[in-house]
Amino acid sequence: QVQLVESGGGLVQAGGSLRLSCAASGRTFSMYAMGWFRQAPGKEREFVAAISWHGDRTYYDDSVKGRFTISRDNTKNTMSLQMNMLKPEDTAVYYCAGGYSGPIPGTVRDYKYWGQGTQVTVSS
């Protein structure tokens, strides 16, 4: 069993930056690929970024490529998402996901464990 807790969301102006963190607990943390997803009001949850088990491979949605950076530290059981050059369309609840043993990126249905989400709001 893995528990995930996100932090770091908030309100920022367009062009600004935020860093999201995900803290994981559970003995099998390092054995899974992990990812970030987001869900805006009235929309389906969508993929943002994913990182492989060892952290040597990453994958990004085209909408965030070049602006967001995903990373993980298996010694600390944490994963992060550095978000730069934020846009109003990045506004959403961001979710940390884990428990996917396949090749990244994976889909919403592929990830077994989810955090409670953290709100990111980008004002224009």
Image (cartoon, rainbow, N blue to C red):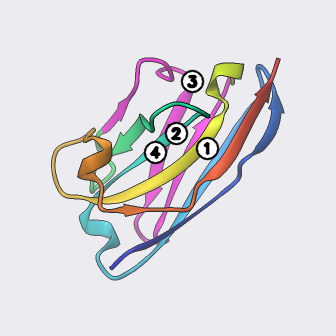
SS for tag 2?
strand
Residue drawn at 50 percent across, 62 percent down: 115
- Residue located beneath label 1 in the image: 93
Residue located 54% across and 51% down the image: 80
Between tags 3 and 2, which lies in front?
2
Q: Residue furthest left?
A: 102
Horizontal arrangement in the rendering, residue 86 relative to residue 117 (left or right): right
**Residue 101: % across, % down:** 18, 57
Distance from Cα at disc 3 to Cα at disc 2: 15 Å
Q: Nearer the viewer, mark 1 or mark 4?
A: 1
Residue 14 in the image, given as x and y percentages of width and height: 78, 20
102 on left or right of 6 = left
Residue 124 drawn above or below residue 16: above
Kindly check if marks 3 and 2 are in contact, taking CB atoms under 8 A apart as contact. Answer: no
- Amino acid on which the number 1 mark rests in the picture: Val
Quote the CA–CA distance across marks 1 and 4: 10 Å
Q: Is residue 66 magenta?
A: yes
Q: Is residue 3 magenta?
A: no
Would residue 38 appear left or right of 75 to someone viewing this image? right
The CA span between labels 2 and 1 is 5 Å
Q: Which residue is mark 3?
A: 67
Mark 3 or 2 closer to N-term? 2
Residue 92's x, y, as percent? 63, 36
Residues at circles 1 and 4 in contact by the CB criterion of under 8 Å = no
Q: Are marks 2 and 1 in contact (CB under 8 Å)?
A: yes
**Upstream in the sequence, badge 3 or badge 4?**
4
Q: Which mark is residue 38?
A: 2
Upstream in the sequence, badge 2 or badge 1? 2
Of the two numbered discs 3 and 1 on the same chain, state the one appearing first in sequence. Answer: 3
Amino acid type, label 4: Trp
